[in-house]
Image: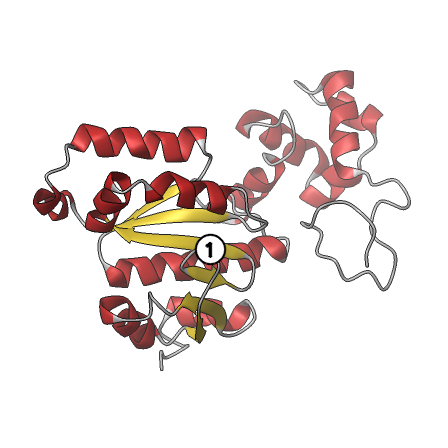
Amino acid sequence: MPDAQNDPSARADAKLGGPLQLLVDDREYQGMMAAALDASDAFAIEVRRLPVGDYCLDAALLFERKTLADLAASIKDGRLFGQALRLAKGKLPAALILEGSTRDLAPSGMRVEAIRGALVTVSLFIGLPVLRTRDAEDTVRTLRYAAHQRRATAGGALPRHGHRPKGKAALQSHVLQGLPGIGPQRAARLIRRFGSIEATIVADAGALADVDGIGPALARKLRWAVEEPPGTYAPRGCRRPLVAPLGRCR
C-alpha cells in the first residue's frame, strides 16, 4: 500500500475520492499488465468482458491498449480501424494507448511509414487520441494520471498549463491572466489600481475602463466574464456535475 504522506499519487487518490474504479477486460488482465496493476495498488479492479475497449476508468473514460506488435497485427488483419471507430463513436471519451518501443516492430516486418499512416488516420480522421507509453508500468501510470485529471476536472479544477507562480504577487497576476484580454502588464496595472484580486473582480465597468490599457470594450468583457445572471446554475437538488452536458437533471 503506498504511503499517502510520501507518495504524491496516493495523496491525489485520497483527495479526489479514494480508489480509482477500473473495469478491465478479462483478456487484458494477464501478464505484465496484471502485475503492474496489482503492484500500483491504486485501483479497485473488476475483471469482466467489455463490449468495447480494454479499460474503463470510473465509468467515465475508456481505453484500448495495444503493444506496438499488437498494433502491427491489427493493421494487417484490418481490425484497427473498426476498433478505433467503435471507440470514437462511443458515449465515453476514449483513447488508444500504444505501448512499447520501435524495436518491438522489427518481427512484424511492417514499414514505419505504414504504421505512421494508420495512426494519422486513427487520430486525425477517426478522432481517437493516441497516447504513447514505454511499458506496462508506464501504461498504469497513464491510466492513473488520466483518472486524476478527470476527477479534478469534474470537481471544477480545470488544469492550467505552464509555469506555476511562486509568491502572492505572481499568483495574483497568474489568476487575473485567466480573464479575457489580460496579460502580465494589464494584470499588474489592475493590482496596482485596485490592490487585490477581490477588488478587481467586483470593480464596475467604469472603474475598470479607467485603468491604462483596459478601456470600455475590454471592461465590458471583463464584467461579462465575472458576472452571473440569476438562474445560471442548476436548482437545489440537481446533482449533475457542472461539466455534464446541458439539459434537465433527471
Vertical relation: 29 (above or below) 134? below
User: Which quadrant does the N terminus fall into?
Assistant: bottom left
Vertical relation: 229 (above or below) 234? above
Most distant residue in the front direction: 77
Front residue of 59/115: it is 115
Specify the amino acid type for callout 1. Val
Q: Quadrant of residue 11?
A: bottom left
Front residue of 160/196: it is 160
**How far from the left and from the top, in percent, is residue 39?**
29, 75
Left or right: where 182 falls relative to 42 = right
Left or right: where 155 falls relative to 33 = right
- The residue that appears at 56% across and 51% down in the rendered structure is 92
- The residue that appears at 44% across and 28% down in the rendered structure is 125
Q: Quadrant of residue 235?
A: bottom right
Left or right: where 240 falls relative to 174 = right
- The residue that appears at 51% across and 43% down in the rendered structure is 160
List the residue tagged with mark 1. Answer: 52
**How far from the left and from the top, in percent, is residue 66?**
29, 52
**How far from the left and from the top, in percent, is residue 226?**
76, 38
